[in-house]
Amino acid sequence: MHGSFASIVPFIVIIPVALLTKQVILGLALGLFVGCYIEHPRPLAGLEAAIAYIGREVGLSGNVSLILFLYLFGSFVGLLRVSGGVKGFSRWMEARIRTPRGAFLFTWLSSLFTFMAPDFRILTVAPIVSRVFERFRIRKEQVAFTIDVTATPLCAVVPIGTAFVAYMVGLMHTSAHHAGAASPYALFLATIPYNFFAWAMLLMGAFLTFFRFSTQVRTATRTTGAMPDRAEARSLLLAHERRGAFALEAGAIGFPQDAAVQRGMRRREESGEEVPDPVEALAKRAHPSAMNLVFPLALLLASTLAFTVLSGYAPGRTLVQAFVQANAAKAMLEALVLTVVAMALLYAVRGTPLNRIMVGFLQGGNEMMPVIVLLALIWAVSAVASDLGFAQFCQREIVQYVPRSFIIPALFIFGCLISYVLGSSFGTWAILMPLAFSLAQGGAGSLAIAAGAVFASGTFGGFVSPLSDNTVAMATVMKVPVMDYANYKLKTALIPVAACAVGYFLLGEIAR
């Protein structure tokens, strides 16, 4: 049975269930049980095997560290929100933006402070710029696109200090473990140049923002003036208050997504009564203070870089060599622990009630649990697939008969379709990464290229899909129809998608 058709049955279950239900966790759970019962076809043996796989994979030291990092990252964002740091930074910047070009420039520069998660960035920056851009007659879609293009595409290629990094390294850890590859973080770094879609959208976004949108703004300002009517301004100001609940990255409509952090959304019970999110309720009452945002971010970045270099330091090594040889996952966790402790102390000294600090810490961390569950299932499914001989089957049945230069482009296009339907970058990566590594082992390309193509395809769906929480959040804040805005982004993204497919094909041809 090893390496037979049975090895792909779990994925035959996972993909349709995830696409039909928009529940990636459900698909992964069913795929895990199917794989375990194929391997152990007895009533209790399959159940026991599934539990054993989850326990074994979660118990690995590297995986425990990643789980702790994700939980603490949620706590980090929760503390930022309840401290009034986001509100204070927003007000500080609002008073200093005076021109359309300055507003566009701020939108890009603000990514230096909000790159940790796409939805954190959107819900922090969009309310600010929506109020700033209302002084100028600029299309709402253009403003939204400028923020969006520096959210998911940027977070997908930032190598430190994001929830994306922890999740991606988690995928690399499992795949590298079962494929016998290099360290997970080193492998993740190697994939960054091959996330063609993220780089293509950043380049296109920069071009559109500073050459096309800015020119249109100057023309519109000369011909129509700068101020919109008051009704439109009021509607923009109210948009932030009318946000709904968005999708979980695992694909469950009604919860948050890519950052896996519950945003300050007001959720509705089945009765229709609005239930305020506790973190959002505390955030609204917090005293605005930009220092409560700037200090933790600066400390997190500085300590991450310092601990990374220290973990790879050895006599005779240069700074670059130390960074390459570092245990980045350990360094990021240590930096995050230090930052969270420092935040709690800072906020307590500055008068934030202890109860508010604990709510931000615990509620923020708890909101990362869906992604932690998602990772645990991915690890277990990957282990089952490896034991069933999934890699050997892919090598024998796909790599042997399909021209190798077409395999990675086809994987990228297939991933784009899945991610568009799911609206989930994390979910797409979870489904396709075992396949990518199996194809790479079979000779379809290097591990970095195959994984980079999967990351690129998931980035596409997280950016353009109408089911993506990024799209829904941005459309709600900017008060534009979701499908209209999604189609606007899709039209812009089609050329980069085609260019990426050609790029992966050329890589395959060069490798031959």
Image (spheres, helix red, strand yellow):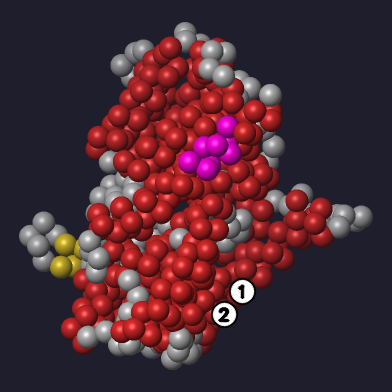
Among the 4 quarters of the image, the one containing residue 373 = top left
Q: Residues within 10 Å of mark 1 (few under 14, many from 20)?
A: some
Q: Amino acid at mark 2?
A: Phe
Residue that sits furthest to the bottom in the current view:
95
Task: Give me the residue at 58% from left, 58% from top.
Answer: 158
Q: Please name the residue that numbered disc 1 is placed on.
A: 299
Q: Which segment did they paint magenta?
A: 498-505
Characterize the magenta stretch by its predominant secondary structure. Answer: helix
Q: Residue furthest top?
A: 1
Asked if residue 503 lies in the magenta stretch, the reply is: yes
Q: Residue at x 25, y 50 (%)?
A: 253
**Is residue 439 something that shows in the picture?**
yes
In contact (CB < 8 Å): disc 1 and disc 2:
yes
Was residue 500 drawn as part of the magenta stretch in this picture? yes
- The amino acid type of the residue labelled 1 equals Leu
Q: Which residue position holds label 2?
A: 295
Q: Is residue 505 left or right of residue 146?
A: right
- Is the residue 244 above or below the residue 193 in the image? below
Q: Position of residue 343 (x, y in %)?
A: 52, 76
Q: Secondary structure at mark 1?
A: helix
Q: Residue furthest left?
A: 271
Q: Position of residue 162 (x, y in %)?
A: 53, 59
List the single residue furthest toward the front: 223
